[in-house]
Image (tube, helix red, strand yellow):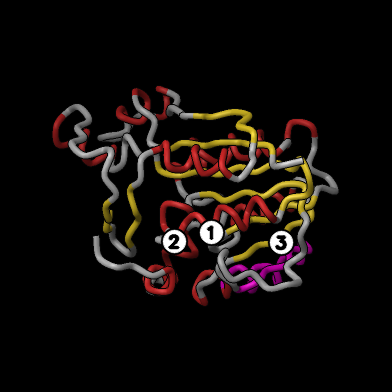
Amino acid sequence: MPEWTNEAAIAQWETLPPEVVGAMDADGDFAKRHLVNPHLLRLLGADGGLTGRRILDAGCGNGYFSRMLAREGAHVVGVEPTDALSGYARRRETELAQGIRYLQAGLTDLPADFGAPFDAVVCSMVLMAIPDWKPAMRACVEALRPGGTFVFAITHPAFEGLGGIWREHGAYRVDRYLADYDMPSTYATDFHRPLSAYLNELAALGCRLREVVEPGLPPELADADGLEAYVRLPNFLIAAAEGPA
């Protein structure tokens, strides 16, 4: 694996075309809409109401999930290191005036006044994109009030590239799960690590695992080539934990 730095990984996301950023404005994309967002909201407590809860959206991207949380009544701080994405989020806040505070910073370099402690921290589709991910997870946990909720979502380490592999083979194939390796994509690189790495680090930080979700696509939505794979196998993994008391 090349010697990646967090700065080099962040720089890749600056190349996202504006039309791609804008297309994800409302709820991310098809996968986030149907497989990730509903579970994040539930695990953060939306079933009981988020009104008044202080939530950190750690690695908020263009801010779409921060905006969803604000519509549920939460007080939200969104942290995002890139100009392209944080700038978009701030412009949308100027237009919508939802009361979201956006900060341009990396999770391993948070400003002293970013607003901790929080009732909950959500880190969606971020940890597998950070080379030096352990300090980022630690920063999320340390931002919690005692016993607060930490929720993270990642691409499922056992089923990366699910749709493309399924279309090619009619099944999923994996040949090196236990190694760490780069996963280049259209705009940036993610980093494969086995699931045990994330869960063991969570335990090492003193968190108590509350729930793990491996979401499947409802069969009635699998009406395009390759989507059957998402009915049968989970492309995402979402974990909720209780922070140290």
Q: Are marks 1 and 2 in contact (CB under 8 Å)?
A: yes
Give the quarter of the figure containing the C terminus.
Answer: top right
Q: Quadrant of residue 8?
A: bottom left
Please state the horizontal and vertical placement of residue 77, each as a whole percent of the image.
71, 61
Tell me how far mark 3 sits from mark 2, CA to CA. Answer: 22 Å
* Furthest residue toward left: 169
Q: Between residues 68 and 6, which one lies in front from this camera angle?
A: 6
Tell me how far mark 1 sits from mark 2, CA to CA. Answer: 7 Å
Amino acid marked by disc 1: Pro
Give the quarter of the figure containing the N terminus.
Answer: bottom left
Q: Between residues 39 and 2, which one lies in front from this camera angle?
A: 2
Tell me how far mark 3 sits from mark 1, CA to CA. Answer: 19 Å
Residue identified by numbered label 3: 77
Q: Is residue 103 magenta?
A: yes
Amino acid marked by disc 3: Val
Query: Which residue corresponds to the image point at 49% horizontal and 38% vertical from the top-left?
Result: 200
Query: Which residue corresponds to the image point at 27% horizontal and 56% vertical from the top-left?
Result: 182
Please state the horizontal and vertical placement of residue 83, each as a whole percent of the image.
52, 77
Mark 3 or mark 1: whose residue is earlier in sequence:
3
**Mark 3 crowd level (few <14, some 14–19, many ≥20, 10 Å Cα):** many
> Which mark's residue is nearer the viewer, 3 or 1?
1
Q: Which residues are magenta?
A: 88-104
The answer to whether residue 195 is left or right of residue 58 is left
Residue identified by numbered label 1: 135
Residue identified by numbered label 2: 132
The answer to whether residue 39 is left or right of residue 101 is left
Asked if residue 179 is positioned above or below residue 42 in the image, the reply reads below
Q: Is residue 199 magenta?
A: no
